[in-house]
Amino acid sequence: MNNPQAPNSDGVKPSLLRRIPLAFGAFFSLLGDADLAVRYVAVRDVAAPAPAPAQPAAAPAVVPPPPPPPVLKEAGPEAALQLLALLQREARLIDFVGEDIGAYGDADVGAAARVVHEGCAKVLREHFTIAPVRDEAEGARVTLPAGFDAAAVRLTGNVVGQPPFTGSLTHRGWRVTDVRLPRTAEQHDARVVAPAEVEL
């Protein structure tokens, strides 16, 4: 009776246990018979599936180069010292901020704050022109398109996704459009923001 697992003309595939001795026998037969090895190679090449057509190589993803780091410029201290001197002269700002106000009552602090407020406002009016960044009223709904000036508008709250962004204007922002600091002599020491006072 024929073994149904053995190879025969009906094309029944041999089992794994049957293929193991066949593989060993074929191995040693191919080592010992060069003509058999040639026929094996010919049969193997005919039976091997045709290679799949080569797929065109995918174009490498174009990754934009990272933006260059920002160039940091060092601000000279002269203008800042000059502004501090103006605030001290008109509003006694350094004296007020440096004072321990814990021992004073609210009325005394409020009276001093009024003087500082008036002096600071005078300095701003005389030496700066300041305009709002946004023209809309605070509380208005605004839409920021793609490419908006992130230095002029700061996003707050739940910031997700990409522009355009729509939200409520909570602060109009301020932009200085003109600066009018007084000129100083070349030998002027800007570090002296308030000279000592000696009464004679």
Image: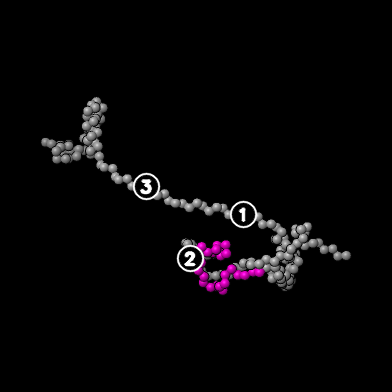
Per the image, is 60 magenta? no
Element at label 1: loop
Q: Quadrant of the C terminus?
A: bottom right
Looking at marks 3 and 1 on the same chain, the residue that comes earlier in the sequence is marked by 3
Residue 136 rendering spot, x and y as whole percentages: 56, 73
Picture residue at 22% right of the left edge, 32% below the top: 39
Element at label 3: loop
Tell me how far mark 3 sits from mark 1, CA to CA.
Answer: 43 Å
- Report the residue marked by disc 2: 164
Picture residue at 57% right of the left edge, 64% below the top: 152
Furthest residue in direction right, as rendered: 200
Question: Which region is colored magenta?
Answer: 129-155
Relative placement, left or right, of 130 versus 190 is left
Q: What's the magenta bit mostly, secondary-structure-wise?
A: loop
- Report the residue marked by disc 3: 57
- Report the residue marked by disc 1: 72
Pick the front one: 182 or 108 = 182
